[in-house]
Image (cartoon, rainbow, N blue to C red):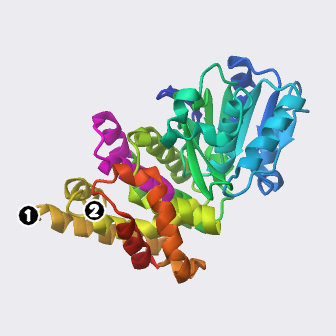
Amino acid sequence: MLKDITRFSFPTLIVFGPGAVASLPDCLSETGIQKPLLVTDPGLVKTAAFTKVQEALKGKHSMIPIFSGVHPNPVEEDVEQAGAQFRSNGCDGVIGLGGGSALDVAKAVAVRVTHDGPLARYEAQAGGYLLITGPLPPVIAIPTTAGTGSEVGRSAVITIPALGRKIVIFSPLLMPQRAIEDPELTVSLPPLLTASTGMDAFTHNLESLTSPVFHPICDAVALGGLELVITYLERAVKNGLDLEARGFMMIAASMGAMAFQKDLGAAHSLAHPLSAEYGMQHGMANAICLPAVMRFNREAASKHYARVAALFGVNTHGMTGVEAADRAIEAVSGLNQRIGIPARLRDCGIPEEGLAKLADKAFEDSCHLTNPRPCTRDDLLRLYRECW
């Protein structure tokens, strides 16, 4: 399967396989981009993945402008600076290269260069998606992690300092026109980052599955994504050169993003403030918070958790839904432990005195609105304390 380049669409056209980055010039031609802006982060420009992209761009596109200032948790100024570079260089499209942060900034740039600021006007929760109109400059997304699935998603998550929190910018128009998923670009990802981004993909799929929004197609996609993470994440963590595991994790991440058009749940509402306030890696925050959220949801989501337990190989025959849910929670906690995820927020330097403010921010976050069990602000604070 991984020996050939395959192309499929759901609905973003994906170019997948080892060496797929070589198809970048074709993707530029297919999308009509003559002068792209490459958006990435400062760490990535020193990597082999960046070199592979440069090699693919030799010739006509070898001198394209590059914005490499994306923060690990992107902020509004990243979008503003990249947008200014887009305009000053007369660009007509964007290449996003990196993890979810770089890809989200690339998509937000496409909005910002065609729409008046500030960026907060377009917050999905406040109805800003109604203000986003086309056409937008085309975006080509090249992920170097297997986590967010932003390469096929229709949203971007950006921290707005004036608001003191992250916002979600959403529109179907934000979906990249091409996603190039090349597992060779992920082989140098360190084990802990492989683990945390992989658990981000797991959380996307799981929270999409348990969201009460009706979308059986996404439910099926989410179950498939969960099975891939359960099968391949440990392999990818233990052996970064395992291209089969790396490739299937990229697919699992994309499946998570496809599925979460249903929306997410409380784990994401807890994770977003941890990144905005303390710079915690998003997938790590999700991974640590997820078992506590699953315990909170165990009765409301027992039917779904029972299916997850079965994917982990648990024989659930004869169990009640809640008993099977408990086995799923144990399995997720065990997976976290085996791949090196810290057990508690305190292990990541999160201060106990900050939990109340985090709970305020988490309650402002819209993801918990589609949690299978309704959450109050006090519920979210109790979950933080359980995770701490």
Image: magenta residue range: 199-224
Q: Is residue 332 above or below residue 176?
A: below
The residue at the point 71 percent across, 36 percent down is 117
- Contact between marks 2 and 1 (CB within 8 A): the answer is no
Q: Residue furthest left?
A: 318
Q: Which residue is mark 1?
A: 318
Instruction: Where is residue 263? Give x, y as percent.
Output: 40, 44
Disc 2 is placed on an element classified as helix
Q: Is residue 251 above or below residue 186?
A: above
Q: Amino acid at mark 1?
A: Gly
The residue at the point 52 percent across, 66 percent down is 285
Specify whether residue 193 is in view. Answer: no
What type of secondary structure mainly makes up the magenta span?
helix
Q: Which residue is mark 2?
A: 297
Disc 1 is placed on an element classified as loop
Q: Is residue 243 above or below residue 278?
A: above
